[in-house]
Amino acid sequence: MEQLNFPNYTFTLKNKENKTYILDLIRKKNLLLTPEEWVRQHCLHFLISNLGYPPSLINVEKQIQVNGRIKRYDIVVYSSDGSVNILIECKAPTIKITQDTFDQVARYNMALKSNYLMLTNGKEHYFCVMNYEDKSYQFIKEIPKYSL
């Protein structure tokens, strides 16, 4: 897999039947190593190792209902009070982050009401803070580190 715009991390990889699998830190199982999974696992390591978020507050690839349809988010980080703090959408490195990507995460966020949004393809990262009173968001330089 290619180098991403994240710090270097140590991953647990396994080869089985000519396919490579990566150990998911949160789900505690080996997953087929696709380009999007490579980005997702880097993002999880970044949240835990660099920003200090406890793994117990992180959820990966769960279903939500958006406008009556079942969708699946990539990563949600909860606050200690159980509210959604960060919603993260991961794309493969070859997928450009476009307005469609922002629209997708915005639709998911209608159901989740996250404080922060992160969009990444591993090469480019975008961070936003939500303002629900103004029904707007503002781009920020980074997601805040974990604090109680």
Image (cartoon, rainbow, N blue to C red):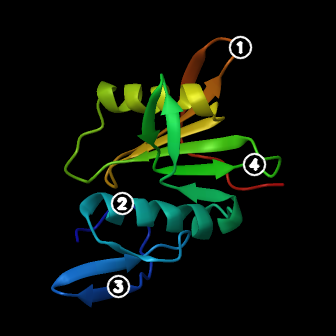
First reached walking from the N terminus: tag 4 or tag 3: 3
For label 2, the residue is: 39
For label 1, the residue is: 133
Disc 2, SS: helix
First reached walking from the N terminus: tag 4 or tag 2: 2
Which amino acid, mark 2? Val
Q: CA distance from mark 4 to mark 1?
A: 20 Å
Residue shown at the point (63%, 35%) measured from the top left: 114
- Residue 36, compared with residue 98, is above or below; it is below
Whether tag 2 and tag 3 are in contact, CB under 8 A, the answer is: no
For label 3, the residue is: 13
Between residue 127 and residue 17, name the one nearer to us: 17
Q: Position of residue 5 (x, y in %)?
A: 36, 59
Disc 4, SS: loop
Whether tag 4 and tag 1 are in contact, CB under 8 A, the answer is: no
Whether tag 4 and tag 3 are in contact, CB under 8 A, the answer is: no
Residue shown at the point (75%, 48%) measured from the top left: 79
Task: Tell me the mark number nearer the camera, choosing from 1 and 3.
Answer: 3
For label 4, the residue is: 79
Whether tag 1 and tag 3 are in contact, CB under 8 A, the answer is: no
Which amino acid, mark 3? Leu
Which amino acid, mark 4? Ser
Task: Tell me the mark number nearer the camera, choosing from 2 and 3.
Answer: 3
Label 4 neighbour load within 10 Å: few <14, some 14-19, many 20+: some
Disc 1, SS: loop
Q: CA distance from mark 1 to mark 3?
A: 45 Å
Q: CA distance from mark 4 to mark 2?
A: 23 Å
Q: Is residue 46 left or right of residue 31?
A: right
First reached walking from the N terminus: tag 4 or tag 1: 4
